[in-house]
Amino acid sequence: MTANRLPTPVMYRVVAGILRPVLRSLMRYEVSGLEHLPRSGGFIVAPNHVSHIDPFPWAHVLYNQGRPPVFLAKSSLFEAPVVRSVMRHTNQVRVDRETVTAARSIGPAVRAIEAGACVAVYPEGSLTRDPDLWPMRGKTGAARLALHAGCPVIPIAQWGPQDLLAPYARRPTPTRRRTLVRIRFGPPVELADLRSDPVTREAIRTGTDRIMQALTHELEQLRGEKAPAERFDPKAHGLRSTGDYRSGGES
């Protein structure tokens, strides 16, 4: 991998300048595992997903480390007024989830990684449906991208954003103190033995399982609990795997 890093777009710096003071006023971070972040070259981060606000804390930490993440973001964000301009001018990558065109995001994401970017992929694809907020069954995007790009995958476990903004809530829960958000960066997921040309479906499935295992392990360390032996599968419970399964809205 190249040692180069992508320059941070002007729009990214503007948005970060606006958001950082807000995030500091709402949350305090307890961060561990920064030593696992690659010092050079592109890589993927794979966070768990417990709240609509949870991309901001770990992205804030990465920004402060000089590795502002490029998100694989749902297509609706590229169609919303104002937001679409921000997404395009900060070089985010559009993903048309649950469609035959979803794989088109692989090319732009691989090119970003090859240029030295940190690319963020939520491996669950949506807010977890697990009733206790453990990582649910993973989707294949993170593993597929990692195997095509040949880059490290760093799991990011986080716990606490849901205390500020509950899953699917529209308004934050007011508190007298800043919400504690704990963020744990894990070691790279071992995928080297799965890489081949062409990338096989079996390798992608195995890679997805390894990423979810690593992510769940890091969250267990944060929570001091053991996750269920079997990951929650939305389809087995008759739930949609994307969108607000309670109302049919977006997630």
Image (tube, rainbow, N blue to C red):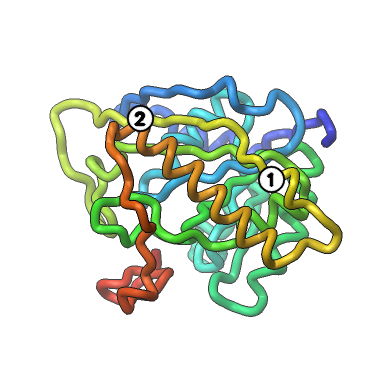
Q: Is residue 61 left or right of residue 229?
A: right
Kind of residue at badge 2: Arg
Q: Could you tell me residue 144's position as x and y percent? A: 68, 58
Disc on res. 191 = 1
Image: 118 above or below 83:
above
Check the picture and name the quadrant holding the N terminus. Answer: top right
The residue at the point 61 percent across, 57 percent down is 206
40 relative to 99, above or below:
above
Helix, strand or loop for disc 1: loop
- Taking the image as shown, residue 61 lies to the left or right of residue 71, namely left
Q: Residues within 10 Å of mark 1 (few under 14, many from 20)?
A: many
- Specify the quadrant of the image occupied by residue 23: top left
Comparing 98 with 69, the one in front is: 98
* Label 2: how many Cα within 10 Å (few below 14, some 14–19, many 20+): many
The numbered mark at residue 221 is: none
The percent coordinates of residue 228 (x first, y second) are 31, 51
- The spot of residue 78 in percent (x, y) is 56, 63
Q: Where is residue 18 shown, x and y percent of the image?
A: 45, 34
User: What is the quadrant of residue 12 in the picture?
Assistant: top right
Residue 135 in sight in this render: yes
Look at the picture and state if 32 lies above or below 99. above
Q: Residues at badges 2 and 1 in contact (C-beta under 8 Å)?
A: no
Q: Relative to residue 14, is residue 49 drawn left or right?
A: left
Question: Image point 52% across, 54% down: which residue?
Answer: 123
What is the three-letter code of the residue carrying label 1?
A: Leu
Q: Identify the residue at horizontal 78%, vertical 61% (top origin).
A: 199
Question: How many badges with numbers are in the image?
Answer: 2
Quarter of the image for residue 42 reads top right
The quadrant the C terminus occupies is bottom left
The label number, if any, that marks residue 182 in the structure image: 2
Q: Mark 2 falls on what kind of element? A: strand
